[in-house]
Amino acid sequence: MNQPAHSLLSPVPRPASPASPSMPSYAERNEHHWKRNLAVCVFGSFTTLVSLSMLLPFLPLYVRQLGVESTSAVIQWSGIAFGATFLGTAVTAPLWGRLADRYGRKPMLVRAALGMAVVMSLIGVVHSVHELVALRLIAGLVGGYSSASTVMVGSQAPRARAGWALGILSTGALAGNLVGPLVGGLLPGWIGIRGTFFAGGAMIAVAALLTIVLVKEDFNAADHARHRARASSEASTAVRRTNYVVVAALLITAMMVLLANMSIEPIITVYIGSLGVPAGHLARIAGVVMACSALGSMLTAARLGALADRIGGWNVIAGCLVATGLVMIPQAFVTHWWQLAGLRMVMGMTLAGLLPSIAKLARSSVDESRTGQMLGYLQSAQFSGQVVGPLIGGQIGVALGLHSVFFVTGSLLLACAGLAQWARKS
């Protein structure tokens, strides 16, 4: 199953003429399904992201409830537990993307939803922080509904509308990230922390049912094999350096997007507490602040995705990286929680154009038969950022102070903008 590096990264020559009627492309075979599938994927991504992000406001409280006592240990274990899911997804996303190329996109969606529904419910019955981390890791290994959705939508949407479609999908995921912390700030007070996990599992089970019933896919394994054989025979054996640079820049940028957004998340409750918010309101205020980034992204994701369709993905990527890096810095100087909330909203607005633009460029870099594999690597890079971000944020927060997190991540984003410009011109 393993493919040589050049099979994925080398330029793939395009056919001189459209595919013959006897061998339509995957996108052409699904041209009557992609809009409905997009709608289901948006809903499924929303519900799964609600379930995954709703624990953010009370994660430190849950870790303390499981027997961790010191503040520094609570911060560190919260970062580990939160990042474990994304570590699991980062490890398996390329595998699921490759299997999606071989066996279809829908089976990967169903597998992710069912696996996450079961594991999320089990998290509600853990008795130690080690069990919590283990189940969060398993959720990433078997889950990844949002990743599978990106592969399906990125493969089925017409190339001319891929940026818009991926922007709409991103809006659904961002809406989940918006609602999740709000739910996490309110629901534990009604049904308890453990009951909140059971509710999250039930939400994902609904998404699984809708996926099974409503998602349609015309996938032909024989056609896939022919496309793959044709691509292999046409691909050049000489790999140009510029191709490595472009693909590497896309993967690094995708990682940095999530790293920047998630670096402060595990310690944000502690940071808001240092701004004078009373302990009784801490979980609720933390939920509001966390939601602001997703709210800002919801406002601009589809528009920036459509803008990438018009002016090119690289232009949107460079502009968004610089803007996000600059917005990170003032967050270190806030004196009230509402100032942090406002800056996080602006940051979300600038972040929103990155992932749809990156995915659009990634799709065009490979043959159709390897779209899932390439987007799988892209998802792996993104979730690596979600792993590294909380770990960096937690460690820097403990060693250098919470304010230093913003300086480090802002500087990394500006450096990444320079890398993107260099890769584009190479």
Image (cartoon, rainbow, N blue to C red):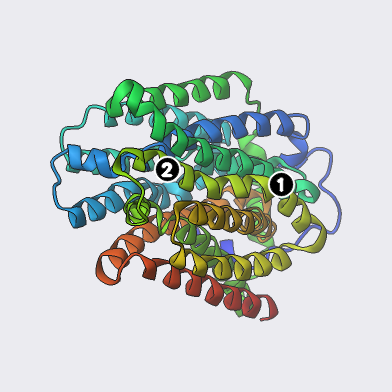
Q: Quadrant of the C terminus?
A: bottom right
The residue sitting at 57% across, 38% down in the picture is: 175
Up/down of 282 relative to 189, above or below: below
Closer to the camera in the image, 158 or 368: 158
Q: Position of residue 179 (x, y in %)?
A: 51, 35
Query: Judging from the image, what secondary structure is the residue with disc 2 in?
Result: helix
How many numbered marks, from 0 up?
2
Amino acid under disc 1:
Ala
Q: Is residue 159 at all visible to an observer of this figure?
A: yes
Residue at the disc numbered 1: 302
Q: Which of these two is toward me, 350 or 277?
A: 277
Calculate the distance from the C-alpha at mark 1 to the C-alpha at mark 2.
28 Å
What residue is at 83 percent from the left and 44 percent from the top?
Answer: 20
User: How many residues crowd mark 2 within 10 Å: few (<14), some (14–19), many (20+)?
Assistant: many
For the point 57% across and 31% down, the residue is 106
Residue 199 picture location, percent across and down: 39, 23
Can you see residue 1?
no
In the rendered image, which quarter is residue 358 located in?
Answer: bottom right
Horizontal arrangement in the rendering, residue 350 relative to residue 24 (left or right): left
Residue position marked by numbered label 2 in the rendering: 285
**Residue in the picture at 67% in, 40% down:** 223
Image coordinates of residue 92 in percent, x first then y, are 41, 48
Amino acid type of the residue tagged 2 in the rendering: Ile
Q: Using the image, tell me which numbered label, if any, was put on residue 252.
A: none
Of labels 1 and 2, earlier in sequence is 2
